[in-house]
Image: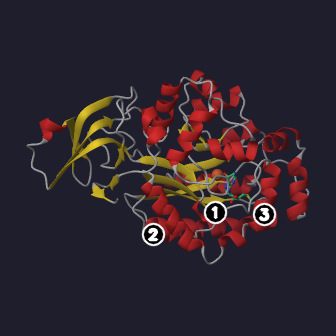
């Protein structure tokens, strides 16, 4: 048993409770008790530490990133989705060269240093498998499937199966094999059906990029625009969209997926997502860089949707730090009340990141019975509020995962 405490515990529950001079009593499996530090001090503990001028939060969760794209710095084009996607097709092989492993290792260290303890990693190739499985991070490992040419669908499905099986060898209480459907514009219905069947029968968490750009909406709805040329240009294929947005949503209905972006989703589509208990992941910096737009938080609020916030990959961000991400979001949503926005953002990488999660993992909040995963930030301000944390904390002072101190 162990005991840690600090001047403020931000419990990250629904009402954003703060406990002053709080303590957490825990073992490697779970939080045993939360109370004033002085009330816990007499309990038997192998280790006791009080962090002065600090706050403790649950570790932060970055549930959408592409670690395999960590080498991008100035290679991919920003400012327009079509230009960006063209540049991905042209440069993705060169971004996966021999130095990728070292770069991914570095990014994992950066993630831990920024207070992240749980990631959702979209894996396009499997290059990130061992490095994530052997890291201290908890991971949803989303094996991605993508492909539209009928003649290679079977090979693509076999490749997905092989990557999934490989990832299952590392399955543990920290590492959760999962599936990602790349997007409605890039996955053939036959492949979608097979992948969804896997997700259903094996109870795998599912992630999907959905309505990220105007170009995607235009293609799915009107069969025109950027994507008409895209398939001709790169795959020498005459294509039709596979689904309308609502048909695509309908096919995912029972799976409670993580829908990433949803920038161009209508009121009705967001409503449909809320009704199927889907999660929405928003990546503010990525959305600014590729699409010049951000998710409408007021509309989400009206529909009872609590967005999860994440960074996306360095393919569309300069950093995987959630502290950077949330600090930027504070400035982007300039019409929102500052303090309540800060709480919404922090809860979007803690409590709401894991509320109703598909595997029933108890994390994202400091509560008895929850995982003993903590981030400690030095913060010598008067209020030690969510806003202070997002403004002033640039890295974690300490990090615990499974009750063990990592940093
Ligand atoms: O989320 C961003 C933007 N939207 C879509 N895809 C990606 C992002 N960052 C990396 N990607 C990957 C995606 O997983 O780029 C490829 C896929 O493997 C694009 S499709 C050729
Ligand atoms: Fe993404």
State left or right for residue 374 relative to residue 79. Answer: left
Residue 62 picture location, percent across and down = 51, 49
State left or right for residue 2 relative to residue 320. Answer: left
Secondary structure found at label 3: helix
Secondary structure found at label 1: helix
Is the residue marked 1 within 8 Å of ligand 1, measured from its CB?
A: yes
Quarter holding ligand 1:
bottom right
Tally of numbered tags: 3
Quarter of the image with the C terminus is: bottom left
The disc, 2 or 3, on the residue closer to the chain's N-terminal end is 3
- The answer to which image quadrant residue 14 occupies is top left
CA gap between label 2 and label 3 equals: 31 Å
CA gap between label 2 and label 1 equals: 24 Å
Residue 210 in view in this figure: no
For residue 317, above or below residue 9: below
Is the residue marked 3 within 8 Å of ligand 1, measured from its CB?
A: yes
Secondary structure found at label 2: loop
Residue 251 in view in this figure: yes
Which residue in the structure is indicated by mark 1?
A: 69
- The answer to which image quadrant residue 277 occupies is top right
**How many residues crowd around disc 3 within 10 Å: few (fewer than 14), some, or many (20 or more)?**
few
Q: Residue at x 91, y 54 (%)?
A: 229
Residue 155 picture location, percent across and down = 71, 70
Q: Which labelled disc corresponds to residue 169? A: 2
């Amino acid at each position: 048993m162990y005991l840690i405490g600090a001047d403020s515990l931000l419990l990250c529950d629904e009402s954003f409770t703060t406990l002053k001079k709080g303590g957490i009593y825990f073992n490697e499996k779970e939080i045993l008790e939360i109370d004033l530090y002085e009330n816990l001090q007499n309990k038997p503990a192998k280790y006791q530490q009080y962090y002065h001028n600090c706050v403790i939060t649950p570790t932060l969760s970055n549930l959408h990133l592409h670690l395999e794209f960590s080498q991008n710095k100035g290679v991919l084009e920003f400012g327009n989705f079509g230009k960006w996607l063209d540049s991905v097709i042209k440069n993705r092989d060169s971004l996966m060269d021999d130095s990728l492993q070292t770069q991914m290792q570095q990014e994992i260290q950066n993630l831990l240093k920024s207070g992240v303890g749980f990631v959702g990693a979209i894996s396009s190739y499997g290059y990130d498998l061992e490095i994530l499985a052997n890291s201290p991070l908890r991971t949803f490992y989303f094996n991605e499937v993508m492909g539209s040419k009928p003649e290679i669908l079977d090979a693509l499905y076999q490749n997905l199966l092989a990557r999934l099986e490989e990832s299952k060898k590392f399955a543990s209480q920290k590492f959760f094999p999962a599936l990602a459907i790349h997007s409605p514009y890039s996955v053939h219905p036959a492949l979608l059906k097979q992948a969804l069947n896997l997700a259903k029968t094996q109870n795998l968490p599912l992630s999907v990029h959905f309505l990220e750009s105007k170009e995607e909406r235009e293609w799915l709805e009107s069969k025109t625009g950027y994507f008409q040329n895209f398939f001709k240009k790169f795959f020498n294929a005459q294509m039709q969209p596979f689904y309308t947005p609502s048909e695509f949503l309908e096919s995912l209905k029972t799976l409670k997926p993580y829908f990433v972006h949803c920038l161009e989703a209508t009121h009705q589509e967001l409503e449909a997502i809320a009704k199927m208990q889907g999660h929405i992941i928003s990546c503010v910096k990525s959305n600014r860089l590729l699409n010049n737009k951000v998710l409408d938080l007021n509309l989400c609020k009206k529909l009872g949707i609590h967005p999860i916030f994440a960074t996306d990959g360095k393919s569309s961000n300069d950093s995987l730090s959630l502290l950077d991400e949330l600090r930027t979001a504070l400035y982007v949503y300039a019409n929102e009340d500052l303090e309540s926005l800060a709480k919404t953002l922090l809860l979007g990488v803690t409590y709401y990141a894991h509320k109703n999660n598909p595997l029933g993992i108890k994390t994202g909040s400091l509560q008895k019975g929850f995982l003993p995963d903590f981030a400690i930030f030095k913060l010598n301000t008067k209020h030690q509020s969510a806003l202070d944390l997002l403004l002033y904390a640039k890295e974690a002072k300490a990090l615990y995962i499974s009750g063990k101190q990592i940093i």
